[in-house]
Amino acid sequence: MQAGVLITNGGPHPADKWAEVSADQIVALIDIDDRADSPQATEARRAKRRFREDLIDTLTGHHDDCIGKERGALKTHGVARYDQSEVVDDHHPETLEAACQAVSDAASKYPVLGNHFSEGEAADVVRRILRSHMNHIMHIERGWHRDLGGKVFGEHLPQAQQQIAPGGNGVGQAPQGTA
Amino acid sequence: MATTGICASFKGEGYNGTGHNLSSSGGDTIKAVLIKVSPARTFDYTQTNGGTPGTGTPSATNIGTDEASGTGYTSGGNTLTNNGVTITGTGAYADFAGYSLTSATISVTALVLINSSSKNSTTNRAISVHDFGGTQTVTSGTLSIVFPTAALATAILRFN
């Protein structure tokens, strides 16, 4: 029941930070007995560590896609967007689907993980995790849009800064710690 | 400082007819009250009510002046979106959508969930306390509360 805190100075959270949060929650679904010293357990722990890194790499792109699409929607709809649902399935279902598939694909690289993430309860939970984080991304983008008086984050900056701002984040602020 | 845990009073209210409605549709209004740095009180499972956040001496019945303050945060706490209650296997859990402060400048150390809907003429009943493991500071940025995976073994509120 531990609540996590994600902090970013100067703007919304960049996609890689969301990817790390998602990856941590997903790999936590892999339950390995810490006391086990069998070759299988050793292999599973190794796979779990590498799987986490793979997930961060692949999910960064998908979360960035969600950020970009929500900014696009805000640009199109303006403040009317605030009245629309903050559920990713309603607006960007293909983004959620692609992210879920990416998790399944990443897991398939590790025989020890088998098809754990491609079907059944684990796949459902993965979808719930990614949906929750993408909904949260949409909420934050709308919050910044409101705070900036109807401007999409990043576009309120001078042109030169916009050009050096990374796609999903902006202004090059150093992300700060999480708990 | 705070100690993470479900409030004992919240558990008791499940048995005495003053229970909480955490349903996604028509549920009670649940608020997340942020706790400041170096609070006077050590918040834990003994909290029974949020009282009047921002005002008064902190106690088991009042968060009082231990509530955090800063840009982007509204005194009294932010309203959460109830994701509903799931009964599964041998237990049940409740989940909420994560929430964020944007354009925020604030330092916080913990979170207290309270139920601001009135039941038997009582509001702001305490639900749970969540420690952040240290001071969390944001400057003109985004502070997000990310709830754990909605599942029986991990959800933010669960009975299993």
Image (cartoon, coloured by chain):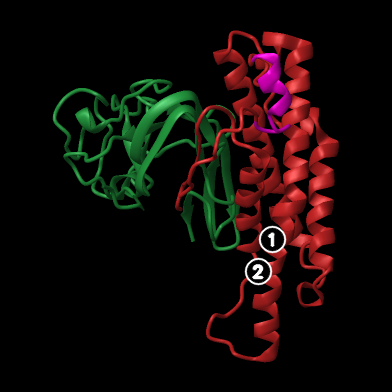
Chain colours: A red, B green
Across and down, in percent, residue B76 comes to 34, 23
Q: Which residues are magenta?
A: A158-169
Q: Amino acid at mark 2?
A: Arg
**In this view, A92 is above or below B72:** below
Residue at mark 1:
A53
SS label for mark 1 = helix
Residue at the limit of the structure toward the bottom, as seen here:
A38
Q: Is residue B17 visible?
A: no
Which quarter of the figure has residue B124? top left
Residue at mark 2:
A49
Q: Is residue A104 magenta?
A: no
Residue at the limit of the structure toward the front, as seen here:
A160
Q: Is residue B69 left or right of residue B100?
A: left
Q: Is residue A112 visible?
A: yes
Q: Nearer the viewer, residue A179 or B154?
A: A179
Q: Nearer the viewer, residue B100 or A169?
A: A169
